[in-house]
Every structure is written in structure tokens, then in C-alpha cells.
Image (cartoon, grey):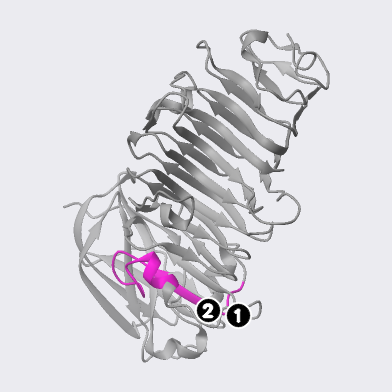
Amino acid sequence: MKVCDTMRALLITALICPLAALAQAPITYQGQLTESGLPHTGVVDMEFAFYNVPTGGAAELVVPQPGVSLNDGMFQVALDMDGLDLSQTWYLEPRVQGTSLTPRQRITAAPIALYALSGAGIGSYESVITVAKSGGHFASVADALASITGNSPSNPFLVWVGPGEYSETELVDIPAHVHVRGSGPEVTLITSDRSSSEPNQLAATVYLRDLARISDLSVENTGTGSLGYAIYSFLASRDAVIDNVTATASGSGTGGGRSGIHLRSSAPTINNSRFKGYGATGFGTAVNAGLTAVHTEAGGFPQALILNSTFLGGASSTVQNCTDNSGTGYGIQIDRSTPDIRNSHICGGYRSVALLQNGQVRIQHSELRVSSSSGAFMFEITASGFISVTHSALFLFNNSFKFTGAGTSLICIHNYATNHWLPVSNGTTADTACNQ
């Protein structure tokens, strides 16, 4: 094997525990091996040498790592620094098949446990747990979360999830003051086949509670029961955050529903994320949605803040094309909720946006699409409440595809039809608003 000519350290991500415990704990090191610019696949013998100088000198500690498996070049190892003086700066030199990769990488002295986290722009965490296919605290995200105690505003936790697919049986339950962060939506996947006949966390892969956060990973639900959600959230405020997440529910089955995210009396902040639901069949009865939301508790309607995100719903995995009117696909389906949606893309094969019973859907600076098949409508309002769309782009084939339902409150201000880039009409009723 030709020794790879480049090594790119994606993150010297998290030391497994706070500084006080580091003397007896490993660090988790993640990187990628490439050969001639391409990720290397296979198994290699590695070792990691710690020096107290950037060049020359003798290694103070060498940690062997035989038989390291590479997945698209990616690897992750646990390196035991026991015996080193953690109050000083160290330089790490990886070696592959006996060949050193240079330059050495500087590991700052104090606080070592927070070095990579601050450098990655995550901020400071009092407690850090790693989940990895090998070498981490846990191999299961659900198990890592179940182990957490003492989380509070003064003791926030970071659960960092390394590259790979994590197939979970138990609910991935993210409590308050805990941030679950992956290595990127195309790198870290949390998946399950959980489903339920009840619209609650039993149907979900991930449960996001108030004051919790999830970012930089993908979540999947392939359950074939009545209901399946990638992410479920209940009674969360805008202080619960979803950022740079791809969430897909795709289990097959007749009837029921699939939602990339289901909000129950919940109003999290969602940013730069993608939600998709497909797989359920049954014209006019099944629901495949990027987002579903319902308010079931006393008090005012929840007001989620949604920014720079995508919502897709349809019958099949080609839902992103927004061409299949199977009578199941909703970009967004809302019941007694008031989300504030900005700079987003909403596409449903059957309905782009549907408002049931009551509530308000406020959309600004976004793009909306729906299938060109007969029976598909951009907007549906079945009772009271209203949908307002301002400064946005609507892919309307003609006015007959615009609106259906018993409600009349469709507010359209300063919008364009993207199929010919001409203004659609302003108005505050279904008859006058958004006509081409």
C-alpha cells in the first residue's frame, strides 16, 4: 500500500471528560487519510507520538493503534495521554505504517479539554461525552444521553457523535442543557425504525425537549407502523434549537403518517435544516410531511421560528422534485400553531402548506411549490386562521392550483410566480390573493 500523502484533521474534537479527570482518560482524535487526493479505504496500522517541541526532539509518549479501519478515509481513535504533564503544550505526530505525517499538530495546554470545542465554534461545556463506533465513551447515542445527570444552566453537556451510522432501539431523548452535535449531516446518521399509533415520542427517533439542542447530523426514521417521526418535540420554547440537521421519515405503509419533524405544542428555533417525509400511502388519508405541528395544551399557540430550511412531503424518495400528487404529500401541515417561517423552501406533492382548524402560518422571503397534477393545491385552510405569504416566490401553474378549503384568509403581499417571474396579486382573501 502506498502511504497516504495527506492527512487532514477534521477536528481534534473533544476530550472525553473535563480537565479534572483527564489524567486517567483518553482523548478522541478524528481525521481523514487521503491518497493522491482521494479518501483511502482499508485497514492501516497507526501510532501517535506526543512531543514537547514542534520539530525534532524525542517522543515523550507513543500510543500504538494497530488495525484502524477507514470509512471513506475517516477514522477515529482514543489516545491515552496518561503520564503526560497536562499543564504544558504538546505536539501530536500521527504515523501510518511507520511513516510520520507532518507537520505535528499543536494541542494547547490549558484547558486542554476545551481546546477543540472553542476552536470549532461550539463554546465552552463543563461536561463532554463522546459517542463513536470505537474509542468513545459510548457506542450508542441513546445510552450516552441516558447516562447524563446534573445537567443545568451552569453545567451544560456536549454529546459529540463521531462519523458513522448509529442504529438506535431506544429513544434518543435530549434533555435540557444538552447539545448533541455530529460531525456533519453527510457524516453522522442517527437512525431507528420506531413507530407508534400515538402521536408522541414513541413514534420518534429523536425527542428534543425544551432548552436542548441538536446540530450537524442526520436523523432517520424507517418505521412502518402507523406514525413515524425523525424528530419529535413537545412543549419546547425557542430556546430549543435545531441547526444544520437533515431529518427524514421514510417508512412504508398504508395510512398513517411520516414527518421529518413533528411539533406538539412546541416552538423551537430551526435553522439551516432539511426535513422530509415519504413512504405512507393512501390518497387523502395518509400524510407525508416535512413538518407537522399541532397544539394540544392550554394557552396561546406556539410560535416556532424557522429560518433557512427546507420542507418536503410526498409519496416517494423523489419528493424533492415535488411532482407526485399521491394525495399524501405536504410540505407543512399545521393545526393550531403559528410558525414564523423565513428564507425557506416548502414543497408538497399534494399541498405546499395546509392549515387545519385554526392558527396562523407566516411565511416571508421563501419559495413554495406544489405538484402540477389535478387536485394539488398550494394552500389549504379548512377552518379559521390564516396563511400569510410576503416577498416570496410561488410556483403556480394557474389559479386553480392555488387554494382549497373552507377558510378564506389567505394574505398575499409582494410575491412572484416563479414559472414566469411576474407579480401575483396582493390581497387578503382566497379569491383575491396570489392570483396570476
Q: Does residue 408 belong to the magenta stretch?
A: no
Give the image location of residue 403, x and y in percent: 66, 18
- Residue at 50% of width from left, 90% of height from top? 20
Q: Nearer the viewer, residue 179 or 317?
A: 317
Question: Amino acid under label 1?
Answer: Asn
The reply to whether residue 246 is visible in this rendering is: yes
- Which residue position is annotated with label 2? 127
- Asked if the residue at tag 2 contacts the one at tag 1, i.e. Cβ–Cβ closer than 8 Å, the answer is yes
Q: Does residue 400 lie above or below 368 as drawn?
A: above
Label 2 crowd (10 A; few <14 / some 14-19 / many >=20)? many
Q: Does residue 125 belong to the magenta stretch?
A: yes
Direction from residue 302 to residue 121 in the image, left or right: left
Give the image location of residue 22, x and y in percent: 44, 86
- Residue at 46% of width from left, 89% of height from top? 21
Question: Amino acid under label 2?
Answer: Ser
Direction left: furthest residue = 1
Q: Does residue 393 lie above or below 431 as drawn?
A: below
